């Protein structure tokens, strides 16, 4: 769940900072990228070098040390999936509540739009102090999540409330905050991805620049929302997402045949693959020799998988992609109608091989939604939600 997520981990000056070392290594074990930001008080308790070696990233104490990065507080806050402060002292809670940004941690907090989690740690009387409780309430109103404090042995020796939650409880809370809703549970979705290869001879083929990223991201997003996902993929270098039934194919014909086998019972089919429109009429079984100066290769049309699905929909929600270099909207609309789709996602061919993209989602009734500067992940979630709307309605009809 935390694999590939970026956690900004603020450490303020509480004795519990020693437990944050375990938290960092647990986060790393789960595949998260961790950047630790320490307050000057925290540095007196735990060495920044420990966090540096545990996280594999520089420990941030003073933003002025990062003059080579323009606006380091913005750069840091933008890359975070979540910002966690553990331990969070009464002082830091108070500063955030008042909008004070007088060090690296509080400046990043103020600049960040990421989800935020606070693990307070302090003396029991400090925690119960009215002003601290007012500040905590203020943070909750600002949609900060809290984990703890717990009742246990405090630094002063008393057994009372104020102890920082254990690293695993903090991780559970992070998972809870980051996991998307399970709104696709019970739905089975078929997704295609990547380009196909049309063999000319044993060493040569016709293909295209599709990297498969959009289809794989769609599959990953759908499975994380609880869907049962079958992914039919052309050759590509991506690792199949965990929990997705992945079938690798080579040619448009193989993709066509696998879609025919797996379409049964699917509530939605999303054709993100860049299927070849033409294949060589003859595949040579021996390597072609360059005997003549000119060589003409005859091509035959492949079957249009999506158009075929559109002719026999059986209530399946059909999503197509339109990769265009010009007249995106009008070309996409034409494909939507011609192939009898429910929605089509128009994107520019420059999106091939990129992580970020721009996409326009057009539905049957002509409603257009343009997503500018979105990551493929965000686009994937948006498409999945749309694909789920109709099947969910159908299942309750
Ligand atoms: N598609 C398909 N089978 C094909 C070709 C395309 O299922 N043989 C699907 C693609 O997966 C995509 C949609 O049809 O979802 C549109 O593909 P695109 O390549 O943009 O358009 P084409 O229909 O192939 O038309 P053209 O290449 O002329 O733009």
Image (cartoon, helix red, strand yellow):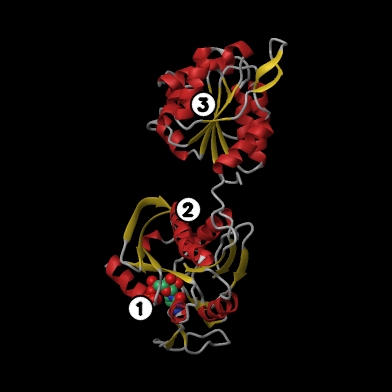
Q: Is residue 165 visible?
A: yes
**Dot in front, 1 or 2:** 1
Q: Residue at x 50, y 74 (%)?
A: 196
Q: Residue at x 69, y 21 (%)?
A: 151
Q: Could you give the CA–CA distance between mark 1 and mark 3, rounded to whole angstroms?
A: 55 Å
**Extreme front residue here?**
397
Answer few, some or many: residues within 10 Å of disc 3's Cα (few below 14, many 20 plus, some between 14 and 19): many
* Horizontal and vertical percent position of residue 130: 52, 13
Classify residue 197 as left or right of residue 147.
Answer: left
Q: Residue at x 51, y 40 (%)?
A: 81
| Of the image marks 3 and 2, the number of the one nearer the N terminus | 3
* Horizontal and vertical percent position of residue 203: 55, 78
1 and 3 marks in contact (CB < 8 Å): no
The disc at residue 338 is: 1
The picture quadrant for ligand 1 comes to bottom left
The disc at residue 377 is: 2
Relative depth, front residue between 51 and 318: 318
Classify residue 235 as left or right of residue 335.
Answer: right
* Horizontal and vertical percent position of residue 97: 44, 21
Q: Of helix, strand and loop, which one carries label 3?
A: loop
Q: Of helix, strand and loop, which one carries label 1?
A: helix
Q: Could you give the CA–CA distance between mark 1 and mark 2, rounded to whole angstroms?
A: 28 Å
From the image, tell me which residue sits under label 3: 60
Relative to 295, say whether 2 is above or below: above
Q: Of helix, strand and loop, which one carries label 2?
A: helix
Q: Is residue 68 visible?
A: no
Relative to 50, say whether 364 is above or below: below
């Amino acid at each position: 769940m935390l694999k590939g997520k970026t956690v900004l981990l603020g450490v303020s000056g509480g004795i519990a900072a020693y437990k944050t070392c375990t938290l960092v290594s647990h986060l790393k074990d789960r595949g998260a990228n961790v950047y630790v930001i320490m307050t000057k008080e925290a540095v007196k308790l735990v060495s920044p070098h420990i966090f540096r070696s545990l996280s594999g990233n520089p420990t941030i104490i003073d933003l002025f040390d990062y003059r080579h990065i323009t606006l380091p507080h913005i750069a840091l806050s933008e890359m975070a999936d979540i910002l966690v402060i553990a331990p969070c002292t009464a002082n830091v809670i108070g500063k955030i509540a008042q909008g004070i940004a007088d060090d690296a941690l509080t400046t990043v907090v103020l600049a960040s739009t990421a989800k935020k989690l606070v693990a307070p740690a302090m003396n029991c009387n400090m925690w119960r102090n009215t002003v601290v409780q007012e500040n905590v309430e203020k943070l909750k109103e600002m949609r900060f999540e809290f984990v703890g404090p717990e009742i246990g042995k405090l630094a002063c020796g008393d057994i009372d409330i104020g102890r920082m939650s254990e690293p695993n409880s903090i991780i559970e809370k992070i998972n809870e905050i980051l996991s998307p809703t399970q709104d696709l549970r019970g739905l089975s979705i078929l997704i295609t991805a990547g380009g196909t290869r049309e063999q000319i001879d044993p060493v040569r083929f016709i293909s295209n620049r599709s990297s498969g990223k959009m289809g794989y991201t769609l599959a990953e997003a759908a499975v994380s929302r609880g869907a049962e996902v079958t992914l039919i993929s052309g050759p590509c270098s991506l690792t199949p997402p965990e929990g997705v039934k992945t079938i690798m194919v080579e040619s448009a014909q193989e993709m066509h045949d696998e879609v025919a086998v797996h379409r049964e019972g699917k509530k939605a089919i999303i054709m993100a693959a860049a299927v070849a429109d033409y294949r060589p009429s003859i595949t040579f079984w021996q390597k072609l020799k360059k005997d003549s100066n000119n060589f003409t290769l005859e091509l035959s049309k492949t079957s249009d998988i999506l158009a075929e699905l559109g002719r026999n929909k059986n209530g399946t929600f059909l999503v197509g992609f339109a990769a265009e270099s010009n007249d995106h909207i009008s070309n996409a609309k034409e494909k939507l109608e011609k192939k009898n789709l429910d929605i089509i996602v128009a994107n520019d061919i420059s999106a091939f091989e990129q992580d970020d993209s721009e996409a326009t989602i057009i539905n049957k009734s002509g409603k257009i939604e343009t997503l500018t500067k979105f990551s493929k992940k965000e686009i994937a979630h948006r498409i999945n939600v749309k694909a789920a709307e109709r099947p969910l309605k159908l299942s309750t009809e």
